[in-house]
Image: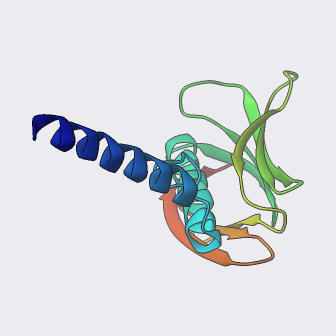
């Protein structure tokens, strides 16, 4: 009896492991299109919420923003290219921050003298998801 319970338990573990892989339940990036765009938008907004609060905004555009971080004096630039959010730090090589999907975008808008509205739209051919946040910044 013990042997049959052990074999059954092992088969159940293998079955659930196979289902997990097939459905992508523990994948870093979800396989489901709706969940994928939610993940992309959330990750991008989290990155922006870590970079931008209390920074000094130099230039603002629809899909790009030049700013000086509160921790440095270096002018940095955020922009969207090929469905990804990129960060350019001075003369250094640009680095990709977050995936947004092929049609994704980030919109920056001056809300007030101390406010910046950031809207992130992650978009693929199957689904899209939009998130916004207001951040406290200074303009120079």
Which residue shows up at 61% across the image and 75% down it? 130
67 or 113: which is nearer to us? 67
Residue 38 horizontal side relative to residue 74, left or right: left
Tally of numbered discs: 0
Can the viewer see residue 73?
yes
Q: Is residue 75 above or below residue 97?
A: above
- As drawn, the residue found furthest toward the front would be 1
Which residue shows up at 61% across the image and 53% down it? 44
Which residue shows up at 56% across the image and 71% down it? 131
Q: How is the image coloured?
A: rainbow
Query: Which quadrant would residue 71 be assigned to in this image?
Result: top right
Q: Is residue 112 above or below residue 13?
A: below
Horizontal and vertical percent for residue 77?
A: 78, 41
Can the viewer see residue 117?
no
Residue 33 horizontal side relative to residue 115, left or right: right
Horizontal and vertical percent for residue 53?
A: 50, 47
Horizontal and vertical percent for residue 116?
A: 59, 63
Please state, as top left, top right, bottom left or bottom right, where the N terminus lies in the image: top left
- As drawn, the residue found furthest toward the left would be 1
Which residue shows up at 86% across the image and 24% down it? 93
Horizontal and vertical percent for residue 75?
A: 75, 32
């Amino acid at each position: 009896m013990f042997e049959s319970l052990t074999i059954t338990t092992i088969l159940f573990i293998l079955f659930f492991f196979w289902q997990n892989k097939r459905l992508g339940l523990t994948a870093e990036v979800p396989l489901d299109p709706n969940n994928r765009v939610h993940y992309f938008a959330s990750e991008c907004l989290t990155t922006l919420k870590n970079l931008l609060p209390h920074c000094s905004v130099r230039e603002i555009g629809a899909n790009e923003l030049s700013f000086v971080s509160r921790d440095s004096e270096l002018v940095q630039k955020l922009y969207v290219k090929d469905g990804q959010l990129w960060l350019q730090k001075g003369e250094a090589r640009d680095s990709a921050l977050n995936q947004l999907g092929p049609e994704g975008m980030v919109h920056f808008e001056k809300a007030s003298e101390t406010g910046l509205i950031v809207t992130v739209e992650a978009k693929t051919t199957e689904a899209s998801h939009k998130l916004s946040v207001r951040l406290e910044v200074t303009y120079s």
